[in-house]
Amino acid sequence: MPETTVILNEASIQRAVVRIAHEIAERNEVSQEVVLVGIQRGGVPLAERLGRILAGIWGHSLPTGKLDVSMHRDDLDQRLAPDVQPTVIPFDITGKTVVLVDDVLFNGRTARAAMDALNDFGRPKRIQLAVLVDRGHRELPIKADFVGKNVPTSPGESVRVVLDESGHADEVVLEKP
Amino acid sequence: MTWNRKHLLDIESLSPEEIMTVLDTARAFKAVGERAIKKVPALRGKTVVNLFVEPSTRTRISFELAEQRLSADIINFTAEASSLKKGETLRDTARNLEALNTDFIVIRHSASGAPHFLAREINSSVINAGDGAHEHPTQALLDMFTIRERKGQISGLNVTILGDILYSRVARSDIWALTKLGANVTLCGPSTLVPKEFERMGCRVTYDVEEAIRDADIINLLRIQHERQRKTMFPSLGEYSKLFGLSKARLARTKPEVLIMHPGPINRGVEIDSQIADCARSVILEQVTNGLAVRMAVLFLVNGGKGPQGVAG
């Protein structure tokens, strides 16, 4: 059995998400320009949660989409074909501030693929990145704009995020092999 | 998700889970085709050879567009304008193509088993685009995709395949896929073209067309393949149309929600009444749209596949 440590529990996740939402609201004065796009799969429930909090802050709902980056990955040769999830962006992103949302930021390759994939949908005015956990070990010059928690890890460890899964309490767990 | 195959050679050797993986993946690729920018970089830098030793228009165009939308480089190779006409063997042709560092070979051949032979001989991924009267796996996959999209599921549906079964690779691949996914398959047509032996594949054979279509949820019509018949298997096309063609009178005696499918090219007035081909219950053109998505999914999946092949037969 792998050794596991709880990094964030349900209450601390909620505090982190609320703080990220306020930081997004503070950074983006024109709320009508902001759209949220969750990266499949872990970023999708997080984006929905951020959307609900931001709607309360701004007093209007904001467009929220989901993006699968499998077809834009740079490691398709080195792995089995990934499980492709639906991409649903039912609004125009051109001229908007797109906040990409993911659960864990690791080597940065998913974020790069996500920015590539977004280009197929339009030309955003700017792209910002929000993550619940930044675990380090970047392989690309990518940095998150909004971070729930920085977690020092070693490359062999894994970070597991449980969010909005029925029958499970929300938590972020660090697993040592 | 379960896909670790380097080739797509037939439906017979696939598991139900593998078939569903293709259908799920194809759904994402269908969405790509509905965007303003219909191209993704998944196969950038890869080279695909479309080796069509037997003539084909729609399957070749569908594969070619699928490859382009995945950003692959493409070589089109047809029998009429090739060294095969000069006596080169299939193996030598393929090895020459592979010497150009190709990654995929999509093959259409009049000989059953040609794709399996190639898969043993060369290092590229091989995709069967139709081999003789054996199989046409991507057609079956697009048929399953279309049925699932329209009906929500495949298990438990009554599917009737009507027409030339004997010479049809589409029928064989469809029968494998439908029975694996739990549909009830009925075959119907002239007895010369629908031998009872097909019941060993797990389906039912009947020569009573009214009974075959009465309870069907899906009617899949197959074209009479004049070009494959060595001798005439029935008196005339007019008689075939009268006895087995889907007329308006026959359609009126089917379930109101029945779907009419056809792999194309259709022969209006022979196996299908011209107006039925264009009616709301006909999904013939949806099959074409879905074929593109399914072929993109297959190329995407075999690109990642490294595992053992388990070639059937």
Image: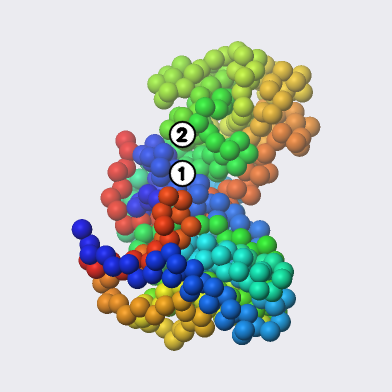
Query: Residue A136 at what x, y percent from top left?
Result: 36, 81
User: Observer-nearest residue: B89 or B19?
Assistant: B19
User: Observer-nearest residue: B81 or A75?
Assistant: A75
Label 1 crowding class (10 Å Cα cut-off): few <14, some 14-19, many 20+? some
User: Observer-nearest residue: B102 or B10?
Assistant: B10
Location of mark 2 (residue)? B181
Label at residue A86:
none
Location of mark 1 (residue)? B20
Circles 1 and 2 in contact, beta carbons < 8 Å: yes
Residue B16 in view in this figure: yes
**Which element carries disc 1, helix, strand or loop?**
helix
Q: Is residue B48 left or right of residue B266?
A: left
Report, in whole angstroms, how far the alpha carbon at label 1 lies from the one at label 2. Answer: 9 Å
User: Observer-nearest residue: A68 or A12?
Assistant: A12
The first of marks 1 and 2 along the sequence is 1
Q: Residue at x 61, y 36 (%)?
A: B151
Kindly identify the amino acid type of the residue bearing the numbered disc 1: Met
Name the chain letter of the residue that bears numbered label 2. Answer: B
Residue B130 in view in this figure: no
Kindly identify the amino acid type of the residue bearing the numbered disc 2: Leu
Label 2 crowding class (10 Å Cα cut-off): few <14, some 14-19, many 20+? many
Query: Residue A129 at what x, y percent from top left?
Result: 53, 78
Query: Residue A177 at what x, y percent from top left?
Result: 22, 66
Name the chain letter of the residue that bears numbered label 1. Answer: B
**Which element carries disc 2, helix, strand or loop?**
loop
Q: Quadrant of the C terminus of chain B?
A: top left
Total marks drawn?
A: 2
